[in-house]
Image (cartoon, rainbow, N blue to C red):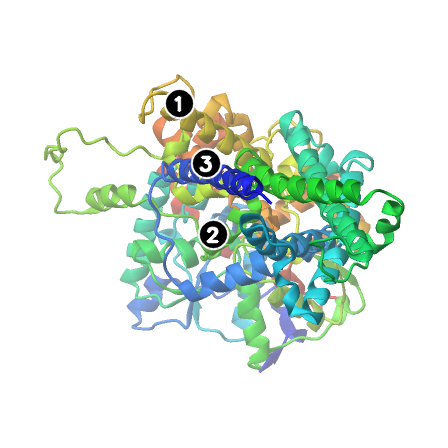
Amino acid sequence: MVSTNDLYDMTQEELKVPTMAEMMAQGQQPEVLFWVGCSGSFDDRAKKITKAFVRILNRANVPFAVLGTEEGCTGDPAKRAGNEFLFQMQAMMNIQVLDGYEVKKIVTACPHCFNTIKNEYPGLGGKYEVVHHTEFLKSLLDDGRLTVEGGQFKGKKITFHDPCYLGRANNIYEAPRDLIQKLDAELVEMKRSRRNGLCCGAGGAQMFKEPEKGNKDVNVERTEEALETQPEIIAAGCPFCNTMLTDGVKAKDREADVKVMDIAELIANAQDL
Amino acid sequence: MSYIDNILFVLVLAAGFGYFALNVKKLRRNIKLGKDVNRNDNPGARWKNMAMIALGQSKMVRRPIAGLLHIIVYVGFVIINIELLEIIIDGIFGTHRLFAFMGGFYSFLIGFFEILAFLVIVSVTIFWIRRNIIKLWRFAHGDLKGWPHGDANYILYFEVVLMVLFLTMNAADYHLQGVGADHYTQAGAFPISGIISPLFDGMAEGTVILIERTAWWLHIIGILIFMNYLYFSKHLHILLAFPNTYYANLKPKGQFENLESVTNEVKLMMDPNADPFAAAPPTEEGAILEKFGASDVQDLNWVQLLNAYTCTECGRCTASCPANITGKKLSPRKIMMDTRDRLEEVGRNIDKNKGTFVDDGKTLLNDYITPEELWACTTCNGCVEACPVNIDPLSIIMDMRKYLVMEQSAAPAELNAMMTNIENNSAPWQYNQMDRLNWKDEQ
């Protein structure tokens, strides 16, 4: 059992990120596959979330692996944009890779990857146990494989933005909130939360296009609502929500006093004073 | 007494139910224009949904004020319609208050109906004020301009008139019972109409009988008219909410359907043993190649069409739509209203052309729903979650997007770029797949 007390010191340490190929070469099978996702692999902000999650996995000695260069987009944005053909091509390729490595359990920090692999891959032959990283982190804490104390977040006002593809799409509302409460932080709810949570504006492939003509951007609307709770931190559980809300905070000129952070970053930095 | 009344009553009743049956037939035919989809799995969960959501109004009360008022009107109408059984039997056989033999229980029933009727009038009045005086955002919204606005108010007027007739009928009856008029046996309790009945004091018995009979006739005729109005109105939800909640999607909301026709093609493409030069398998004579997605109502499935007829235009979907509340054109309520309007148009076309649809040069896409609306959707499922009767506007939006992209290659340019990236390098951005693990070593 380890404490997140040590996590900050670890940031200087080298991350241990084995790939499935390396594991297989050694005849090993990890407990869980960490599906990093495109955002977590390439987006500068999301890469920090990826690393924070890996630091926790390393600290808790979770035998995990990534697909690395064998991972490809799940096809979520193609499917939501209406391109079923491209989606299924991506899905079939990924399923071939996953099945090749006999993957049983997958964890991901992206609710879009989570939803697609969990709900849409089984119909195409890809059947895995899929968990979101907030659920996985909660299970690490529940099983005593990781402990966390509030540290720098003790008493801080944190509001949680429900990602649509975690919340409404899959009815997961409590795991991220339980984790925030484990930090001894003050969890404040927005007017629209849980099943009524307002979208950040990125879903359905909106992330990749300019919005249609309107009188406001969705992320600004949502950020204003988050700011109404007077938070010190807006917590997210999705790299796309994170980007949208970060942009919203910038648009409202509140970067100086309000941070947008992923739940994994909160846990990893819990003792970072 | 002659039998003219009884015969007239039976004729009115037959006409009322006959025309209604005709429209129900039309309704069924129109819904069946949709493609087949199997929603007969897991009947246990389906019955439970219907019991909780339609019968139990569990999603209505998420907005407590509207929910409570709605329950009053809903319970009022269901319960007061028990009285209809007596009215129909009385009408056919010329009896009066046939169930009076139940004595105390009858009094309890009539008294209960009266209190409900009064509460219905109060609730409907508040509904009218919310819609016309306070002008709640959902009701003042542009979706409801014209007929939908009128329709909503006509329903409220209908309800008030029916309840007033019911109470007038009882008040006159109560008065006549008091003065010992022939035929009017002592029966029932009249907590509300008893307050009105003193108005009849001093009136000639014949006049009060005329008032009672008029109210009785107008009440039953009004109910028959209201029943037949349903097919033309958003008020159809009082019937369709039940099948609609039964047949609603049971899968996780994030799970979008995988097109089977695409699966077969993709499998063939990825099969190393497939002969790349093989001729396409012969299609059956007259077989229509399956179209991807939906451009018109016939491309949607029957549950989506049932959804359209069930929608009562409350606008909870639109009020929770991130696109609509930030001023975009998309409104999930309008998606449902457009689908119903187009379906009705297609239905009329079929009626006019002896049972077959003749191309009218119009489609649901473009003529009713524009690509601009479809592309504004974030697929957040807010509308689906908000609907008190589990209507799924998102599935229609998605089917139409599929048509735009797979049949017309008409995605917005930025989305085409995103999709090209996925095809080329397996990520929505232009990064090399070989760089996917670079983050590991970056500072």
User: How far separated are the C-alphas under marks 1 and 2?
Assistant: 26 Å
> Which residue is depicted at the point 62% across and 66% down?
A174
Residue B22 shown left or right of residue A94 in the figure: right
Badge 3 crowding class, 10 Å Cα cut-off, few under 14, some 14 to 19, many 20 or more, is some
The residue to which callout 3 is attached is: B23
The residue to which callout 1 is attached is: B349
The residue to which callout 2 is attached is: B243
Check if mark 1's residue and mark 3's residue have beta carbons within 8 Å.
Answer: no
Residue B143 location (% of width, % of height): 64, 30
- Name the kind of residue labelled 2 in the image: Pro
Residue B266 location (% of width, % of height): 26, 43
User: How far separated are the C-alphas under marks 1 and 3?
Assistant: 15 Å
Q: Is residue B184 above or below residue B392?
A: below
Badge 1 crowding class, 10 Å Cα cut-off, few under 14, some 14 to 19, many 20 or more, is some
Mark 1 or 3, nearer chain start = 3
Mark 2 or 3, nearer chain start = 3
| Residue farthest top in this picture | B361
Chain for disc number 1: B
